[in-house]
Image (cartoon, rainbow, N blue to C red):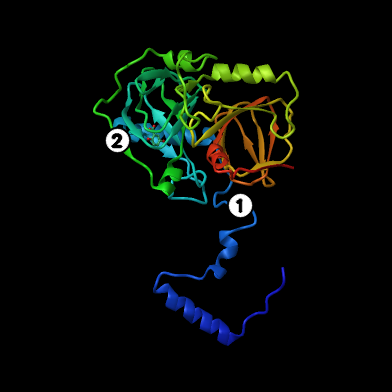
């Protein structure tokens, strides 16, 4: 680019006074901000961050002594990106939080336009009900509540249960497209037996006359970890991808699209000692370690992770993963949104 001569002092003063005049009419010059508005490559506001479960678990449990699930409606500690404090964002488009439900408690039924996912981390005996069907939650299960589906949670067991919530709250706030309502019913009346949706829509078959548009969310509400694990183990006999190890995406089995239109979800296995080659993509991604331990090197800084730790890799940050033990990772991002709009890019370095 050709170097521009520096304007003289009179010109600078004239311009500044001009900017002040046009500001009274709510206008501002593009040429002062163009470089920042249209950068040559993504400049996410979010920064890399990690929440180590062993370090935050006690704070989550303390919330259980300070407020009931009923009172809170949802008893959640929001994981806020350190560069986006006060905005309830883990990336610019996504929200994440740790939800706690104590034995005997109910998180009452509601629905909203925001899509939600749960990834079960700690404790047994809780359930989520989605549109009249309950799903018992086991560690590693990936459960979804698509946009505008009724959902409530409960704990029928005798230990605290914690899961990671992932929602598209910032995306819907950006679009100003959010609606929400509470149900008259505290817990939904069961309309179908547990397991019905998975048998009908998630077992390599579909109801004979069932068809969906590509943007419709799946009727499968739960992707049990036992099945995910079996798939990962099944492919782990082969050769790992140099950049991704063994990585699968969760799909709507009826369409092949992501389970929900705004959030993509992934499961990934890395053999012991495996190191991925550097990789970056435009979807800022939240990762959860389900099994094993290792390191995530993000733009040259190394973060050690172990079971139930959550870490975020912002858009276009270079990621290398190292597995100290056999590692299983769950992750989610806004990739389906970017792909639908023709925006998504990746780079294998
Ligand atoms: O479980 O419905 O973490 O509505 C944030 C908003 C969880 C939920 C969150 C929600 C929920």
| Secondary structure under the numbered disc 1 in the rendered image | loop
Depicted 30 relative to depicted 260: above or below: below
Which percent across, then down, holds residue 301? 67, 46
Q: Which sits in the foreground, 86 or 182?
A: 182
Label tally: 2
Residue matched to label 2: 181
Q: Quadrant of residue 51?
A: top right
Which percent across, then down, holds residue 248? 62, 27
Question: Distance of mark 2 from mark 1, alpha carbons?
Answer: 36 Å
Residue matched to label 1: 42
Question: Would you call the spot at circle 2 few (<14 residues within 10 Å), some (14-19), or many (20 or more)?
Answer: few
Q: Is residue 158 visible from the viewing direction of this image?
A: no
**Does mark 1 have its CB less than 8 Å from ligand 1?**
no
Which percent across, then down, holds residue 45? 54, 52
Depicted 95 relative to depicted 183: above or below: below
Depicted 199 relative to depicted 130: above or below: above
Q: What quarter of the picture does the C terminus occupy?
A: top right
Q: Position of 9 compared to 192: left or right? A: right
Residue reaching furthest to the left? 184
Residue depicted at 55% across the width and 14% down the height: 204
Q: Is residue 13 visible from the viewing direction of this image?
A: yes
Cβ–Cβ below 8 Å for labels 2 and 1?
no
Residue depicted at 39% across the width and 47% down the height: 176
Q: Which sits in the foreground, 316 or 253?
A: 253
Rendering quadrant holding ligand 1: top left
Question: Would you call the spot at circle 1 few (<14 residues within 10 Å), some (14-19), or many (20 or more)?
Answer: few
Q: Position of 213 compared to 72: left or right? A: right
């Amino acid at each position: 680019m050709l170097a521009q001569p520096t304007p003289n002092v009179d010109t600078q003063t004239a311009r500044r006074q001009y900017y002040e005049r046009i500001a009274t009419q709510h206008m501002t010059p593009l040429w002062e901000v163009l470089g920042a508005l249209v950068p040559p490559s993504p400049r996410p506001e979010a920064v890399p961050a990690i929440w180590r479960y062993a370090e935050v678990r006690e704070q989550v449990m303390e919330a259980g002594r300070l407020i009931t699930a009923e009172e809170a409606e949802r008893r959640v500690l929001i994981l806020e990106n350190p560069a986006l404090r006060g905005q309830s964002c883990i990336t610019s488009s996504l929200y994440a939080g740790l939800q706690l439900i104590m034995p005997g408690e109910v998180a009452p039924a509601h629905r909203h336009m925001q899509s939600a996912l749960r990834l079960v981390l700690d404790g047994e005996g809780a359930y989520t009900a989605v549109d009249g069907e309950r799903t018992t939650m086991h560690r590693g299960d990936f459960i979804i509540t698509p946009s505008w589906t009724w959902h409530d949670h409960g704990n029928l067991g005798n230990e605290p249960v914690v899961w990671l919530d992932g929602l598209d709250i910032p995306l819907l706030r950006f679009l100003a497209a959010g609606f929400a309502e509470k149900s008259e019913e505290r817990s939904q009346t069961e309309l179908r037996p547990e397991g019905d949706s998975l048998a009908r829509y998630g077992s390599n078959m579909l109801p004979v006359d069932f068809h969906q548009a590509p943007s419709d969310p799946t009727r499968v509400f739960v992707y049990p970890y036992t099945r995910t694990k079996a798939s990962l183990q099944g492919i782990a006999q082969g050769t790992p991808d140099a950049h991704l190890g063994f990585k699968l995406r969760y799909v709507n089995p009826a369409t092949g699209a992501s389970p929900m239109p705004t959030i993509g979800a992934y499961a990934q296995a890395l053999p012991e000692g495996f190191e991925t080659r550097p990789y970056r993509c435009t979807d800022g991604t939240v990762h959860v370690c389900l099994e094993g331990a290792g390191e995530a090197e993000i733009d040259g800084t190394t973060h050690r992770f172990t079971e139930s730790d959550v870490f975020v890799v912002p858009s276009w940050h270079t990621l290398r993963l190292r597995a100290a033990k056999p590692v299983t990772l769950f992750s989610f991002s806004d990739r389906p949104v970017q792909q639908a709009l023709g925006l998504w890019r990746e780079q294998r370095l």
